Image (cartoon, helix red, strand yellow):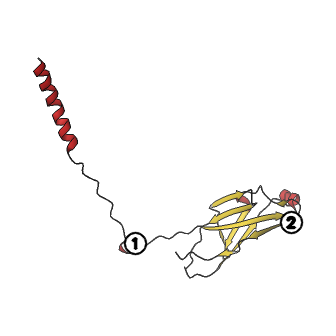
Amino acid sequence: MKHLFGLILWLFFIPIAISAQQPVASPTPPTPVDEEEIGCGLRTELVVINVWVMSSKKGFLRNLTYKNFEIYDEKTRREVEFFSFDGQSNQYIIAFYPEDYALDNKWREVKVKVKLSAEEKKEFGKTSVSGQTGYYPNQN
């Protein structure tokens, strides 16, 4: 009986030990795609503009939202894609995607306007926006 039990264990563990030692096939690495091979490349650049907004009655305005801002890139209105406020520096960080520009290293003028309701205009007084006035397209 002892020998029969040993034989059964031996028959059970030998196939497990053999299969554990067989090499596992490694996955095939992906083939890199060359942009020239497919004929086009997609280039997208997010432009980040830092601005401060001051009012004649309240000083730095700290409670504006992205809806209060309009961005004009070379006099063309752009959508706000990213918006944040840094309370420590009283700075608004606004980003947008430019469209249809050549990478010619020419300065692009940006104008940021603040839109306020009639009530906000009365509360804040005259407002002014200061900060970046443009950018150079990234050449990298």
User: Disc count in the image?
Assistant: 2
Q: Quadrant location of residue 49?
A: bottom right
In front: 130, or 64? 130
Q: Residue at x 35, y 66 (%)?
A: 32
In front: 64, or 100? 64
What is the spatial separation of the Cα atoms under label 2 and label 1, in whole angstroms? 51 Å
Q: Residues within 10 Å of mark 2 (few under 14, many from 20)?
A: few
Q: Which mark is residue 64?
A: none
Q: Is residue 4 above or below residue 101?
A: above
Q: Residue at x 12, y 26 (%)?
A: 7
Quadrant showing the N terminus: top left
Q: Residues within 10 Å of mark 1 (few under 14, many from 20)?
A: few
Q: Residue at x 77, y 70 (%)?
A: 130
Residue beneath label 2, please? 126
In the image, residue 79 lies at what x, y percent? Answer: 64, 64
Of all residues, the one furthest to the front in this rendering is 2
Judge left or right: residue 89 versus residue 56: left
Q: Which mark is residue 35?
A: 1
